[in-house]
Image: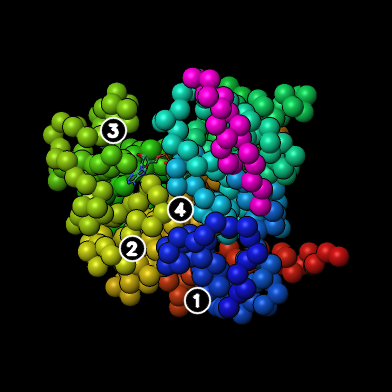
Amino acid sequence: MIATPTLPLEAATPAHICPFDQACSYLEAAAKELRLDQGLLEILSHPRKVVTVSIPVKLDNGEVRVLAGHRVQHSDVLGPYKGGIRYHPAVTLREVSALAMLMTWKCALLGIPYGGAKGGIAIAPEHYSVRELERITRRYTSELIKDIGPSVDIPAPDMGTSAREMAWMMDTYSVNVGHAVPGVVTGKPLSVGGSLGREKATGRGTMIIVREALADQGKSLEGIRVVIQGFGNVGGAAAELLHQAGAKVIAVSTATGGVFSSDGLDIPALKAYAAENHKSVIGFPQSTPISNAELLILPCDVLIPAALENQITEENVHQIQAQIIAEAANGPVTLEANLALEARGVIVLPDILANAGGVVVSYLEWVQGLSYLFWDEERVNREMEHLMVQAYRQVIQQSKVRHVPLRLAAYTLGVGRVAQALNDRGLYP
Ligand code: NAD
């Protein structure tokens, strides 16, 4: 057992669905499998730095509100901290800490020279005007100015943020240090040094991993029935690319509900419909409405949760009918549900592999920026695909060699690489 990390965390959500406790349990399982030294495990279970800042913001109506912003830097053993910024009402320090830890293993698994971090503000961005969001983002960045930087900690978009917020972060940082620093964030607009291919990268990575898993079963994407929860940056891109590759996307949803068509949804038309309807898919022609709870238990070949954590739980796991689950979101399957799925032989493609396309292209964006040499989209996609397929093959190989499910295989690779580096670097002083 690892000691409870000494974090100033809020009261835990019920232990079985607390994302940080779950992240520690997966780490512990990997450490046991790797026979890791207890001291190393203690170090890896604690974030290196936890920052919470106050963000006073003047709303458009003149009222002043103070928000809490977090940034958790879990490990920089392999390179600068790297991880997204989330704007969502459910953001807590525990959640951010869990996501920071996942980033450490994800980067190590993909073989990219980054550590893990995550940040977030507990707001519903749709309740704020664009100008208010800009003020919030700029003040948050300014409060973190000493903790981020192109060789220190490089934020990126996550739920509720996009290239727009990254441009504001890059500008605020640059103005504060006195010169343009494009490398301080990734997922930026192309105009300030973003990379072609970054916007769809996470969804593309998910599509690639699903395609490889099907290929291992002698199948292709053609005609495969796919269900996707979440139709934002990740779910939307995954839907589009899977549709293009011949898969039948039979249901998708957003926070307000979903739509279903047994013949497969016309995804380009659905994207256009959502763009005109405040991102909602409800009411899309030639589809029937479906709730998020119903969507998860639809009969299908591949289920892609691409929204929040803890969507497949002890309560609904026995109703899940998919043969393959690709975790495009972080932590959508709880610990207990994961065990039940593994026992039933359902293939769970773990988040640290299935949604790693985003951080891979963030890395490629950073590399292009540092070398002042920008690539065409075909090259970006090719380099990303190479790293994704390589990591998938390594996870499959590890799973076979150790006789463990894919999640534990992925964790042993990620955790093992960080532990090895930590061991080689030694403990200072
Ligand atoms: P986003 O904000 O662009 O989209 C989120 C989608 O989920 C929206 O369609 C939203 O309506 C939907 N949603 C929210 N709450 C929901 C609920 N209760 N039920 C059903 N749907 C709900 O966010 P995103 O960037 O697509 O991120 C989605 C997930 O992917 C998150 O878990 C994030 O951490 C993970 N992820 C994102 C990236 C990235 O590059 N953006 C990279 C890796 C992992």
213 sits left or right of 121 in the view: left
> Where does label 3 land, which residue?
280
- Local crowd at mark 1 within 10 Å, few (<14), some, or many (≥20)? few
107 sits left or right of 243 in the view: right
Query: In terms of depth relative to the viewer, which is nearer, 118 or 207?
Result: 118
Is 96 in the magenta? no
Q: Hey, what amino acid is under mark 1?
A: Val
Q: Hey, what amino acid is under mark 2?
A: Thr
> Where does label 2 land, which residue?
313
Residue 15: image x %, image y %?
A: 45, 67
What's the magenta bit mostly, secondary-structure-wise?
A: strand
Residue 256 in view, yes or no: yes
> Where does label 1 land, which residue?
401
- The mark closer to the camera, 1 or 3, is 3
Q: Counting residues from the N terminus, which is met first, the one under dot 2 or under dot 4? A: 2
Q: Counting residues from the N terminus, which is met first, the one under dot 4 or under dot 3? A: 3
The Cα–Cα distance between marks 2 and 4, rounded to whole angstroms, is 14 Å
Residue 344: image x %, image y %?
A: 29, 73
Residue 201 in view, yes or no: no
Contact between marks 1 and 3 (CB within 8 A): the answer is no
Q: Counting residues from the N terminus, which is met first, the one under dot 4 or under dot 1? A: 4
Q: Hey, what amino acid is under mark 3?
A: Ser
Residue that lies at the very extreme toward the front in this rendered image: 63
> Where does label 4 land, which residue?
330
The Cα–Cα distance between marks 4 and 1, rounded to whole angstroms, is 26 Å
- Local crowd at mark 4 within 10 Å, few (<14), some, or many (≥20)? many
Residue 428: image x %, image y %?
A: 83, 64
The Cα–Cα distance between marks 4 and 3, rounded to whole angstroms, is 22 Å
The Cα–Cα distance between marks 1 and 3, rounded to whole angstroms, is 45 Å
